[in-house]
Image (spheres, grey):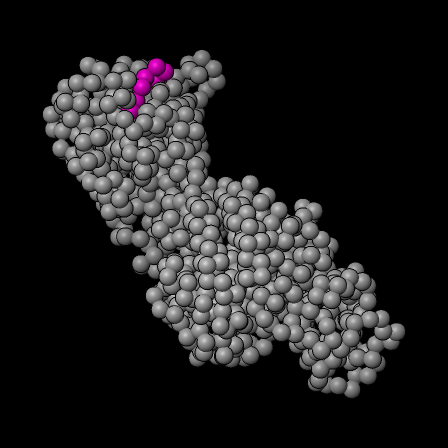
């Protein structure tokens, strides 16, 4: 196996409380050491001066569409998009066709990811068979096969009775239940409910549909008292933040409740829907400026601890449909990092170490990805090198993802993953000049595909 | 704000019709005049997508243009050559007999060629998008597409996808601008508001406001022209946010009725019963139906309107629909003149294909 020293970077490893300019030594696919090396002894050296070196970013909420919707994305193209955006690991949602609701399909995801050989892909299994909300899926077998969590994402586990069972059953596995919080009868609209939706003649999806499910699930969790782990996906409402804050207090010691937020909910408002542009159609929908402020407050005070993109590829023809008929969602893997930086760092809400924690160690702990999300010696050598100041323009035509549905096309942003290392292998590199082969070029096993290195 | 006086100038309808091949500017010189006092007004919109986006001046100019066209229907030769050589396509994704017939007749009175194109259901089922369909039709060389669609925003999306003019003939629950315009035109004619100013006029719109594109278009237009608008219906069908726009909301038809100069009765959408917006047709008709008995509460000269088709005996009793206060057939007749004006103006707007030719 190859070895690599990443030199002179600002190493930020929140799990170990590290934030200093130093070197990271990688050998045999693992983190070997952190610290100054007077003369690197490794096969390769990557000069990270001026850059942040951190644990590989982890996105616990992506849709890779395979099996069944390969025209939108495959595990291979999704993994390529992941490493291009600085993500070394992603957790893919089970709303495929068929749904990932048994151990064989969990296996399938691992096999396809291994074939692609880019990012680590961890499947999230369905809570209920076919995500139909009627019967529990084979949760135990999926957990044994490596499912890292459970969700019917795209829809909520709507029945309170089914949810009570699901929380209890999933608690046995120690895995997390990730809930898409939307009451199907109150929700179900195509944009935020309110004056604008009424004027546009579009069906509303009110905040209360999200808040009701969070409140209900918290009460179920309190009443069952079995230590279930519960995660709120893509929080959109300021009211939800208050409920989660309260629940984290009430459930302390009894259960574990966490929440994630997506870039679009931190940067865009419902006003974007005013011209019926389907690139702004999301589920949950874009809300208001006030909600953004409350989400930022939730990030700041630690109520929301995880950043996740909800990367949701769709074909151009689907997004060209009428607003009500077009599918929900946007892709996010390749532009999430600078968008989070814009929303959270440029706004003064949190700093880089705090933001990196929300994209690494917190995510890894939620999904129990052992030896990931940190740079402890012996852990997997998943590392991202970020140039926090690099200005660039988001251009969907340069994305590795198979889809182009991104409302941030054309945005000028700053901050970019210039190198992504997965298991000690460089999978993405935007600046080949920083990479040097060191003293002993004996090892021909070092394989860095030329196409990974941008000119 | 100076409104063009109705019939002032020699419009394309009242006067000598413009000769074929006239360019837009020359045509405009013979269009109903909007130039009295102040700078020359030019109709600026290549598309008619909503009343929300029109200015007061736009609405008044359009209604004055319609006034000029109204007389064409009473002539022995009911045709002017204003759109000779132009192609107008009726692109209907949703069934509509009346609106389509009205647009067809309006276009034919302007001497346009008309193509009826019925596109079935949602475009998602055919693997062809809305934009595809429109671009295919446009490739045949058309000047205007009249679009009816069951989903909100369809006309806006089309306007972004094609180069020809788009006229929204109703999109989902969003707007039905020509219906709004013809309703307002009817009110102005009926009340003798020749300057298209509705200050001091109270209009009650009754029924399923939440899901009605007719209500939205009426509301925007009426508010802009200075009318007081009372929206009447059960709370489940009455969006509170319309109060912020300047409308009065009421659940009590009997209290609103005596104050109204105009009552616009919306059609009951039966699918709303399945969604339990109200418990039964019987209960709805009891509280919100316009019966002969209830009419006793109204002002004697009140104008009763309905966009059609009427559910007789439900939202309105036959005696009222056919009674002396009813303007329902006048609405249909006025619809022609208004749609002629719309077709004429959008195809002669500065940015329309016509001026580039």
Quarter residue A120 falls in? bottom right
In the image, residue B200 lies in the stretch drawn in magenta? yes
Task: Find the magenta span and give its range.
Answer: B197-204
Of the pair A105 and A281, the residue shown nearer to us? A105
A177 horizontally vs B236: left or right: right
Residue situated furthest left in the rendering: B319
Does residue B288 appear in this view?
Answer: yes
Residue in view at x 32 percent, y 34 percent: B235
Quarter residue B330 falls in? top left
In the image, residue B5 lies in the stretch drawn in magenta? no
Judge whether A20 appears above or below B20 on screen: below
Characterize the magenta stretch by its predominant secondary structure: loop
Of the pair A237 and B159, the residue shown nearer to us? A237
Residue B243: percent from left, percent from top: 40, 29
Residue A7: percent from left, percent from top: 80, 69
Q: Quadrant of the C terminus of chain A?
A: bottom right
Of the pair B58 and A314, the residue shown nearer to us? A314
Residue B208: percent from left, percent from top: 28, 36
Residue A405: percent from left, percent from top: 50, 56
Q: Quadrant of the N terminus of chain A?
A: bottom right
Residue in view at x 31 percent, y 32 percent: B215
């Amino acid at each position: 196996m190859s070895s690599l020293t990443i030199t002179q970077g600002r190493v930020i490893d929140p799990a170990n409380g590290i934030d200093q300019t130093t070197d990271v030594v990688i050998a045999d696919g693992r983190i070997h050491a952190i610290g100054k090396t007077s003369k690197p002894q490794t096969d390769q050296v990557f000069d990270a001066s001026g850059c942040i070196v951190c644990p590989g970013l982890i996105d616990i909420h992506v849709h890779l569409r395979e099996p069944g919707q390969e025209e939108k994305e495959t595990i291979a193209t999704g993994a390529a998009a992941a490493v291009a955006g600085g993500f070394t690991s992603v957790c893919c949602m089970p709303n495929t066709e068929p749904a990932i609701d048994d151990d064989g399909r969990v296996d399938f995801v691992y096999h396809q990811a291994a074939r692609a050989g880019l990012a680590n892909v961890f499947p999230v299994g369905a809570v209920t068979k076919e995500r139909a909300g009627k019967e529990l899926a084979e949760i135990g077998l999926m957990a044994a096969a490596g499912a890292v969590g459970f969700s019917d994402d795209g829809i909520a586990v709507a029945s309170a009775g089914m949810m009570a069972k699901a929380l209890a059953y999933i608690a046995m596995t120690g895995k997390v239940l990730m809930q898409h919080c939307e009451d199907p009868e109150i929700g179900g609209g195509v944009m935020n409910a309110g004056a604008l939706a009424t004027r546009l003649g579009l069906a509303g999806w009110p905040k209360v549909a999200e808040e009701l499910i969070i409140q209900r699930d918290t009460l179920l969790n309190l009443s069952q008292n079995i230590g279930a782990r519960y995660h709120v996906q893509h929080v959109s409402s300021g009211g939800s933040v208050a409920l989660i804050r309260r629940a984290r207090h009430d459930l302390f010691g009894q259960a574990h409740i966490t929440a994630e937020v997506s870039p679009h909910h931190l940067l865009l408002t419902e006003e974007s829907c005013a011209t019926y542009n389907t690139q702004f159609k999301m589920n949950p929908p874009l809300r208001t400026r006030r909600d953004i402020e409350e989400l930022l407050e939730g990030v700041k005070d630690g109520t929301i601890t995880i950043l996740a993109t909800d990367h949701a590829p769709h074909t151009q023809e689907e997004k060209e449909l009428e607003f009500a008929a077009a599918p929900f969602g946007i892709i996010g893997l390749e532009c999430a990092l600078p968008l989070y930086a814009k929303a959270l760092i440029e706004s003064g809400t949190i700093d880089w170490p705090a933001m990196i924690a929300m994209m690494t160690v917190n995510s890894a702990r939620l999904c129990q990805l052992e030896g990931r999300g940190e740079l402890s010696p012996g852990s997997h050598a998943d590392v991202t090198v970020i140039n926090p100041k690099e200005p660039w323009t988001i251009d969907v035509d340069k994305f590795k993802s198979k889809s182009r549905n991104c409302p941030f096309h054309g945005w000028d942003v700053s901050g970019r993953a210039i190198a992504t290392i997965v298991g000690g292998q460089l999978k993405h590199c935007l600046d080949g000049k920083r990479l040097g082969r060191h003293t002993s070029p004996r090892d021909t096993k070092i394989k860095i595909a030329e196409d990974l290195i941008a000119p | 704000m100076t409104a063009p006086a109705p019939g002032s100038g020699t419009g394309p309808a009242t006067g000598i019709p413009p000769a074929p091949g006239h360019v837009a500017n020359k045509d405009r010189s013979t269009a109903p005049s909007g130039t009295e006092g102040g700078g020359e007004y030019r109709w600026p919109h290549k598309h008619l997508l909503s009343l929300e986006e029109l200015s007061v001046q736009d609405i008044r100019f359009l209604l004055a243009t319609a006034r000029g066209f109204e007389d064409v229907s009473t002539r022995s030769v009911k045709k002017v050559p204003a759109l000779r050589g132009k192609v107008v396509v009726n692109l209907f994704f949703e069934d509509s007999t009346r609106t389509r017939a009205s647009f067809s007749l309006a276009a034919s009175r302007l001497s346009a060629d008309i193509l009826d194109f019925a596109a079935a259901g949602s475009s998602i089922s055919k693997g062809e998008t809305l934009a595809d369909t429109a671009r295919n039709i446009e490739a045949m060389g058309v000047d205007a597409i009249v679009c009816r669609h069951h989903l909100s925003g369809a006309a806006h999306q089309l306007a972004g996808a094609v180069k020809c003019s788009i006229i929204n003939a109703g999109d989902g629950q969003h707007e039905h601008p020509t219906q709004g315009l013809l309703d307002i035109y009817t009110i102005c004619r009926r009340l003798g508001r020749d300057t298209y100013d509705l200050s001091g006029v109270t209009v009650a719109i009754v029924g399923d406001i939440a899901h009605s594109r007719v209500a939205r278009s009426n509301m925007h237009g009426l508010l802009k022209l200075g009318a007081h608008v009372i929206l009447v219906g059960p709370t489940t069908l009455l969006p509170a946010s319309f109060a912020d726009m300047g409308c009065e909301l009421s659940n009590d038809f009997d209290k609103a009725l005596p104050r109204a100069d105009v009552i616009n009765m919306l059609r009951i959408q039966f699918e709303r019963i399945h969604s339990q917006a109200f418990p039964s047709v019987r209960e709805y008709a009891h509280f919100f139906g316009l019966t002969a008995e209830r009419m006793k509460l109204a002002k004697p000269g009140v104008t009763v309107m309905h966009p059609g088709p009427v559910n007789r005996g439900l939202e309105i009793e036959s005696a009222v629909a056919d009674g002396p206060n009813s303007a329902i057939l006048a609405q249909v007749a006025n619809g022609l003149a208004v749609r002629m004006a719309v077709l004429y103006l959008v195809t002669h707007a500065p940015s329309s294909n016509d001026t580039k030719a």
